[in-house]
Amino acid sequence: MTERSSRRRGQGGFTLIELLVVIVILGVLSAVVVFAVRGAGDKGENAAAVTDSKTVRTAEEAFCAQNGRYGTMQELVEQKFLSEGSTISEVQFTLGGPCQGAGDDTKSGFIVGPAQPNGGSPPASSGYPELKLAVNGTGNGIYPTPFEWGGRGPAALQMAYVFDPLVWKDARGQPMPWMVTQIPNKADGTLSPDGLTWKFTLRPGIKWTDGQDVLADDVKFTFDYQRPARGIYPGGAASTVTPCFCKSAMADVDTVDANNATREVTFKLNKPTNTFITSLLYSMVIIPKHIWDGVTTTSTPYNILNMHTEPSGKGYIGSGPYKFFDNVVADQLSYNPGTGFGTSHYDANTGYMLGTPYVRKLSFVAPGSDSVLALTNKIVDAGGIGTEEIITSAAFNQVSSYPRVSTPGGFNRVMQFNLTKGFPFNNVKFRQAVAYTVDRQAILTNILGGRGVVPSFGTLNPTHPMVASGLPGYDLGSHAANVVKAKALLAEIGFTDNVKADGSAGADNKLELPGATVNWAPVLYQGVVSTASSTVPTVVQQNLLDAGLSFTLTPDSSQPNADTRARTGNYEMMMVNWGNNTSDADQLRTRLSAPVTAANPCFSCILGWTAANGSPGATEFQTLADQQLIEPSATLRKQQVQRMQVLAAADVVQFALYIPDQLLFYQPGSFSSWYATPGGTPPGPPSYSNKHVFVTGKQFGLPAGF
């Protein structure tokens, strides 16, 4: 017992200090282990993302080899190129998604990126509080209403924040259901086998911003209201105040039926058409019947011409993601639609059908023409170089380090001829001579600093998925050689240089018409140009004079005047500008061969391109134009459209001087989900201001549950 007791006394425990030392040592060892393995998960996730991205890219290229275009994630799964959709990567389409090889750049056709919840913008549980955007020139100077000037250009984009159409475009330029639950298809019977009947179902719970329900009847009313010739709403949206691009497609629709109980809207077409969605549903924003019923061009106290200025703001009651002027009278004090200077605000519609928009407030600031200065002074979060803005190297260097998004633009400045004016404008050799003479590459290089492209004479944007190759360029390598060719063509059709300006005999490099005894000096009209592009018409005038064509240059005083002159044919040659040459290829038909009518109030259309005016290619063009509109095969339709471009280029009925690249710069660390919509943001060029990105905060998809 004594021995046992002695052994127990020799087995003393650890002291408190010893225990603390042991704990510290264990803590250090644990920390070392944690830091050693902490990156393993991240590395694993990164490796998985890289592998997943490669898998999606391979599937996309295989899909493109079979289908001639890249596919959505759903299409990749449906056609067995992927066993299941990726939860790591998403696909963004660029330039309409043509097969051009994969890569993370805007020429690749598609971009594979991480499926981030907000597209890479700084996360915020309450959304992005306010986004300030620079608007160049007078692009901000239009009230965002559906009628008068609200249906075109930059105003149409802002109008679409307040008013929604049934269908909208996603990041790949394809239709996605917006106010409706799905795009009709033949598989489930929502699209009839003959392509004539389209059944849409409105999303439940859509509200106008005054709290009333959006009904199927509102959709029917919207359509009928813009067809006053049918006698349903006589004197409603008359063509003189509705330059909406969707009007030309309304003739293809026979009736619209509505069922408020089921929220169903049924469109019945006169003929199957490839442009029902692209030409009509993208652009036809839905208006509330309880506001506009009874409003005409002459009604009192409200009419279409003053609905945007009356104090109650009835003209801005829509179902869109934003409200324009919560306090109409107060906010109008800071907004000058006459000059476009000032700021217009759009506040998030908290009752929006897709949830409160991610960007809570949009502010469009018009700081003159210097968006670079607005960026560097942090007046705005993002701003683009204007379509025709001349920017110096010094100014460009100030923002060259800013993150940017760039894409070939859809805007162009165009030379067009009125063939109804007779000789020489209806003579193809005269038009070809003009094409040779105008030095388009020098204009792009010297005036716009090379920022853009000189497009083909087929009149489609060079990035268009249906653009034809190998078209005549009317360029022999130098301006001098081109002038010689132009003079030879003019001589072939009888132009001479035998009379001086004072009437005496002799050459003065100013041509006379066949048989004339005085110099020929017609008027070349120019549409309103920005300060940046004001030198372009003068250069064109000098180019023409180099070939002996002495045109008097006459600008129009306002954009409405220029558009009216173009629509009514009050010109012989004219420089106009427009911005939707990336849209559906049917634009060739509506611009080059469709008649200008109340239903097609077109200011970019060619007048008189017919066989009777000495253009034999016009007959074949019109036949193909009608065929491509209803052709069900995408392959055959592309062939028809490309042949149409060959005919248009040969006859030189219209040609663009240049297509400037679009550049958007944004503040580092600010909202960064930007993308340019392939094919154009309805109804204009591929602007970065697609409301989808502001509503969702990301480049892909809709909020969960929609």
Image: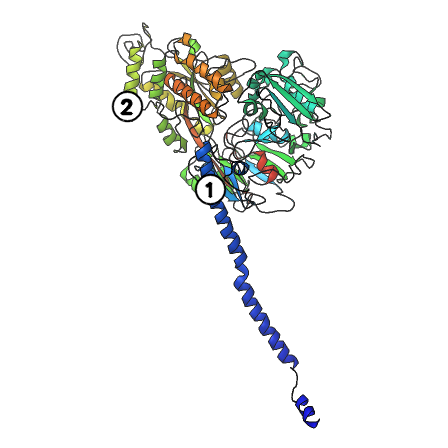
Q: Residues within 10 Å of mark 1 (few under 14, many from 20)?
A: many
Q: Circle 2 is placed at which residue position? A: 480
Q: Nearer the viewer, residue 167 or 363?
A: 167
Relative to 651, say whether 321 is above or below.
below
Residue 187 point in image, percent of width and height = 59, 28
Q: Quadrant of residue 176?
A: top right
Reply above or below: 522 against 205.
above
- Mark-to-mark CA distance, 1 and 2: 48 Å
Residue 116 position, x and y percent, is: 56, 45
Residue 123 in the image: x percent, y percent? 60, 47
Q: Is residue 599 left or right of residue 58?
A: right
Which residue occupies the foreground of this view, 519 or 208? 208
Residue 354 shows up from this direction: yes
Q: Position of residue 48 (x, y in %)?
A: 51, 50
User: Image point 41% across, 34% down: which residue?
Assistant: 451
Q: Nearer the viewer, residue 352 or 548?
A: 352
Q: How is the image coloured?
A: rainbow
- Circle 2 packing at 10 Å, graded few (<14), some (14-19), many (20+), is some
Residue that label 1 marks? 57
Residue type, label 2: Ala
Check disc 1 and give the amino acid type. Arg
Which circle, 1 or 2, is nearer the viewer? 1
Q: Quadrant of residue 145?
A: top right
